[in-house]
Image: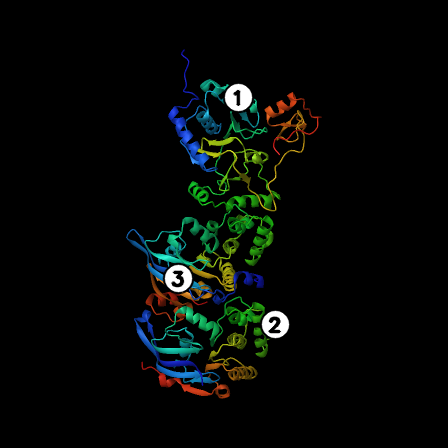
Amino acid sequence: MSERTYNFAYLDEQTKRMIRRAILKAVAVPGYQVPFASREMPMPYGWGTGGVQVTAAVLGPNDVLKVIDQGSDDTTNAVSIRKFFAKTAGVRTTTRTEEATVIQTRHRVPEQSLSEKQILVFQVPIPEPLRFLEPRETETRRMHALAEYGVMHVKLYEDIAHHGHIATAYAYPASVAGRYVMDPSPIPKFDNPKLDNCAALQLFGAGREKRIYAIPPHTKVVSLDFEDHPFERYRHDAPCALCGATDSFLDEVITDDRGSRMFVCSDSDYCERRREAGSTPQSATAEAPHA
Amino acid sequence: MLDAHLIERFGNADGFADPLSDQPLLISEGLTKWYGRQLGCREVSFELYAGEVLAIVGESGSGKSTLLQMLAGQMAMSAGRVLYRMRDGATRDLSLLTEAERRFLFRTDWGFVQQDATLGLRMSVSAGGNVGERLMAVGWRHYGKIRHEAESWLDRVEIDPGRIDESPRSFSGGMRQRLQIARNLVTAPRLVLMDEPTGGLDVSVQARLLDLLRRLVQDLGLAAIVVTHDLAVARLLSQRIMVMKGGRVIEQGLTDQVLDDPQEPYTQLLVSSVVPV
Amino acid sequence: MTHVLEVTDVSKSFTMHLRGGVVLPVVRDVRFSVSAGECVVLAGPSGIGKSSILKMIFGSYRCDAGAIRIHHAPHATDVTQAAPREIIVLRKRVIAYVSQFLRAVPRVAALDVAAEPLIASGTARDAARDRAANLLNYLNVPERLRELPPATFSGGEQQRVNIARGFVGEHPLLLLDEPTASLDAENRAAVVRLINERKRRGAAMLAIVHDLDVRDAIADRLIDVSAFAAAA
């Protein structure tokens, strides 16, 4: 049985050029959703087809790829996608954030600060931040074109009215370069400040919805809020049970069926680095890569 | 209870508070709409001044709703133009505004009260959110102030401010309509368009709504164009009236004059058709 | 004498289109004037066109020919040619009309009905209500009735609210259609005093009065409208 051969990173070159054109447009207009001709991928919609197409378009043979899902390198999806690129592109893969040149992520931003040599690719389910209040695509496009974003604050107003505070915990809307309002994908709002003035290029791919958008390096990203209800990062008030970090986003893990739980770093690589360096739950306050 | 603070903020009922009141606020020139070969509305021209309420009456098919939709920019006109005096005093042809300018105008200086309140409100948003939306759209960013303003408007339209966090789905038809009015008036528009504002409401509910509209128009010095088939609504709310039939304006003038001393056969028919109570 | 009102060759007829276009003539070539500080009473039998003349002056009726000039320095406006907007302004500032029967907006309290013309011309609501209350006092409308809508009042009570509404704004020209028709002797006297006091303050008045005593008490001049009757 002959081994099936793929073009580098699965997609044909014309497709990659098409996606790169879309990416260039997205970088030229930060936060603007660029439509692109999303291809049929060997994974269903909802499993990261947008992110995979963006990664495939920017990957080169010398790149080092890291794939995380909810911060972890070893969930099923992260493993599958990493293997997919290992097979179709033959690139080196890693779990170490500082070694990677391209990081594809689902629903988290790595704790470690990124550098200008890195690209962060987000998997996006619903790219349109206005969709919840305005179902018509024709109308949302108009609203973006005319910067009519009053309705975004209506959503936040409703949160405060019903919950006493802005209850949106993830996919928290942000304004990019003072112009377009975007949905940063379902990352926890804890991660929103990391998007601001990031040294790395941040790309967002939505395969089912067929949109690509981008935040160029060192771009101003401001999360929406009210003067009297300013944006707040939310974090469980506990150190990581494994490494003692007090500055990372924590996952809550239920350990038995009596309600016992523990909090551990969501970013598995970050936690492992800290433990390798000797940090324990008992050690003193952690270094804070993100102020 | 409408009070001095409101009048101080928005001007009083006498159009002369507006220093340019000798210039029309809205000018319609030859507005015409053809649906294929069917005439929707023909050569409608009029001027509206600050503080005036103009009623457009007619039966179904008269063209009154078509006219209102053209004025509101919701329907393209086949011919004619609409000129509006902006807050800075310049009179501009609405078709020459950029879309952004036009949409901004309709969100701030104009109001549009729909016959069906569910179309004019966001039903899944609370009453406070509905009233506050226009404020947020023009840049208000203080939750407390937005909420306070919403509460005071709910009070002005006689909705219990305690219901500010409820969705309009739990409101009666009359309350929804009053909420729609509050939503439109919160940015102090100078012109309000109303399409059958009392349509579909129970008679007692209509009465209450008309009383409210009358007081608001008077206290805020609003200019308004009210499309209605109900002559009693016209008499109660308007000083001027335009009678339409078959797409044409067949008579216009002072409301009491046209209704007390109708000249045209159709107007006489309309007036005599109303059974006095 | 300063003319406030000049009626020149005014003619009117009604055309009943629903009755096959039959024409009902009302008046022809009406000509008279009213000056500041005088009360002119229109006399003549019922149906002769007296009320129609008042309504044409107020702008509620159209006229077929002629001119109705209102002098309100520094302007003079011909009501028959004026745009609706000008007539609206005239009604706010210059001409007040007391109709024969109160035609009030339902559900509005008597005090607010009386205060409305002042509010419409720019007076603050509270001050307007105070002035209206004074007038209602003068006309013996009891306080307990003031916050009630007039629909359930007696004819005389309604008419007094109507008169208060007409007089509250201090308009220079007052048109009065049977102002005392439904009033008892005491209230008739109060209205007569009110009219004469306004006259002394310089208002011009045009009235229709059938009661001869009242007529003698207020009229400076009589005009017999039968002289202007239009031939059928």
The label number, if any, that marks residue A276 in the structure image: none
Q: Which residue is mark 3?
A: B57
Quadrant assignment for the N terminus of chain A: top left
| Circle 1: element type | helix
Q: Which residue is mark 2?
A: C144
Quadrant assignment for the C terminus of chain A: top right
Please tell me whether residue A270 is drawn above or below residue C166 in the rendered image.
above
- The x and y percentages for residue C146 are 58, 71
Is A107 displayed left or right of C70 in the figure?
right
Q: Are marks 3 and 1 on the same chain?
A: no
Residue at 47% x, 75% y: name it.
C94
Q: Name the subunit of mark 2.
A: C
Q: Nearer the viewer, mark 2 or mark 1?
A: 1
Residue B98 visible? The answer is yes
Report the front residue among A268 and B131. A268
| Circle 2: element type | helix
- The x and y percentages for residue B32 are 33, 56
Please tell me whether residue A189 is drawn above or below residue B229 in the rendered image.
above
Dot 2 crowding, Cα within 10 Å, few <14, some 14–19, many 20+? few
Q: CA distance from mark 3 to mark 1?
A: 70 Å
Dot 3 crowding, Cα within 10 Å, few <14, some 14–19, many 20+? many
- The x and y percentages for residue A13 are 39, 24
